[in-house]
Image: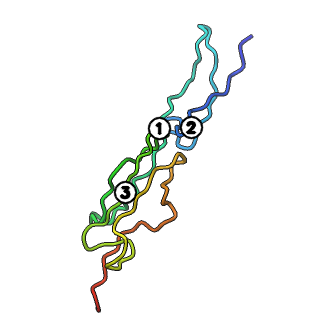
Amino acid sequence: FGRAPALGWCDDGYHIEDHPGKDKFYVSCGADGKHTNVPKCTPVSCKNPVPDFGGHEVATFIGSTTWSQFSPVKSKIQCREGFTFTGKEDGDKEVAMQCLKGGIWSEYDRDLQCRHTECGGE
């Protein structure tokens, strides 16, 4: 009789390669005593948070889109000159963020679109 498949899982902050969000899997024991069907686990990553504005570059992303439990990487989005997150001249031009182990950004609930600043008085 063969052994029943065993449940395996990726370490915290990792998922099965090409299967985002999936971190559990079953492995079998081969005739040679080695596990078979062991998938590769890769670090969770977040999507690039800078939206594409039809080829117009209004923001710059600096940092990493990969989560790391050992050295959390602080990343940031910087609005280009003449843009802020509010569209007001004195609005924030930079937001610090970090890719979380769930594959979302620490500032996921914030509107991270750079807007052209309003002209004073117009």
Q: Could you tell me the amino acid type at mark 3?
A: Lys
Q: Which colour scheme is used?
A: rainbow
Residue drawn at x 49%, y 56% is: 106
From the image, tell me which residue sits under label 1.
70
Residue 32, horizontal then vertical, whole percent: 59, 7
How much space separates mark 1 and mark 2, taking CA atoms? Answer: 11 Å
Q: Which of marks 1 and 2 is nearer the N terminus?
A: 2
Q: Earlier in the sequence, mark 2 or mark 3?
A: 2
Residue ranking furthest to the right: 1
Quarter of the figure that contains the C terminus: bottom left
Q: Are marks 3 and 1 in contact (CB under 8 Å)?
A: no
Viewer-nearest of labels 1 and 2? 1
**Dot label at residue 76:** 3
Q: From the viewer's perspective, is residue 3 above or below residue 12?
A: above
Q: Residues within 10 Å of mark 3 (few under 14, many from 20)?
A: some
How much space separates mark 2 and mark 3, taking CA atoms? Answer: 24 Å
Q: From the viewer's perspective, is residue 29 above or below residue 14?
A: above
Q: How crowded is mark 2: few (under 14 residues within 10 Å), some or many (20 or more)?
A: few
Q: Do the residues labelled 1 and 2 touch (CB within 8 Å)?
A: no
Viewer-nearest of labels 3 and 1? 1
Residue 1, horizontal then vertical, whole percent: 75, 10
Query: SS of the residue at dot 1?
Result: loop
